[in-house]
Amino acid sequence: MSIAGKLLSLLRRKNEYDSASEGGIEALDRSRLPVHVAIIMDGNGRWASKRGLPRSAGHSAGAETVRDIIRACKDIGIPYLTLYSFSTENWKRPTEEVGTLMDLFERYMKAELAAMKAEGVRVRVLGDMDKLPASLAGVFRDSMEATAGNDSLVLNLAVSYSGRDEIRRAAGILVGDVLAGRLKAEDVTEAAISDRLDTAGQPDPDLLIRTGGDLRVSNFLLWQIAYTEIVVADVLWPDFTRGHLIEAVRDYQRRERRFGEVK
């Protein structure tokens, strides 16, 4: 069977699982849904290797999962979704794989833009876009401009992103504001820092999901996840379904969030 044929067969099985889990949305407590869900999408390469496929096939399958999970969040009623798509550390990967990923990002955005506009999805990009290929950066900027008025779901794509670099860039803006007299040193509060992060104006994530089974946050949203609930899914990203998402939300709803207080 060809690589494309294997992918179609695997995705067909996944869609059958998704259809079987549709009723799970109705069982969720609508009054306690997470407002912002962040996902570390891990396992594309391992998924491909286990099936004797090239890593690029894993990334393509992962892109299909992105499409499914965006729609699942809309169906559930989650207004903010942040996907860790490409870290600053990922630039160290083989040149061929990085190039494949950049091409995939560009093709995905071009293919999905019309649907995102129609479905009310607003695209935001987190990270240092200056490091991206000019054509991809242009596609991202066009997508953000074209969807700026949408309010059904805010989709944050973290690309060329790291939490430490985000904080470093925010600190640089703060230093510039203080030196220019726009801000006093004593005005550098937590809110002032948050206002200069890539996620400015958005609520911090309520729920962080990591696929692939690893127990680390991988330099992702380090400032924003101070009190975020974490769910680790022992499933590789291309196999992650809306059923897994619903179960993660159900797990979140079973927890008591205290934020350091005693209840």
Image (spheres, rainbow, N blue to C red):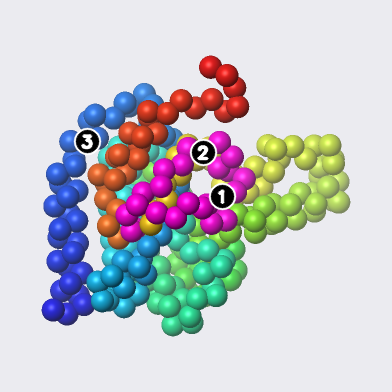
Q: Which residue is mark 1?
A: 221
Q: Is residue 30 visible?
A: yes
Amino acid beneath label 2: Thr
Report x, y in % for residue 155.
Answer: 42, 50
Mark 2: which secondary structure?
loop
Mark nearer the N terminus (2 vs 3): 3
Q: Quadrant of residue 14?
A: bottom left
Report x, y in % for residue 33.
Answer: 38, 31
> Which disc is residue 228 wearing?
2
The secondary structure that most of the magenta stretch takes on is: loop
Mark nearer the N terminus (3 vs 1): 3
Mark nearer the N terminus (2 vs 1): 1
Left or right placement of residue 14 versus residue 227 in this view: left
Left or right placement of residue 135 versus residue 107 in this view: right
> Which disc is residue 24 wearing?
3
Q: In the displayed orientation, state which residue is furthest to the top.
A: 263
The answer to whether 233 is drawn above or below residue 45 in the figure is above
Amino acid beneath label 3: Gly
Contact (Cβ within 8 Å) of mark 3 with mark 1: no
Residue beneath the point at 56% across and 60% down: 161
Neighbour tally class for label 1: few under 14, some 14-19, many 20 plus, Cα within 10 Å: many
Bounds of the magenta segment: 213-237
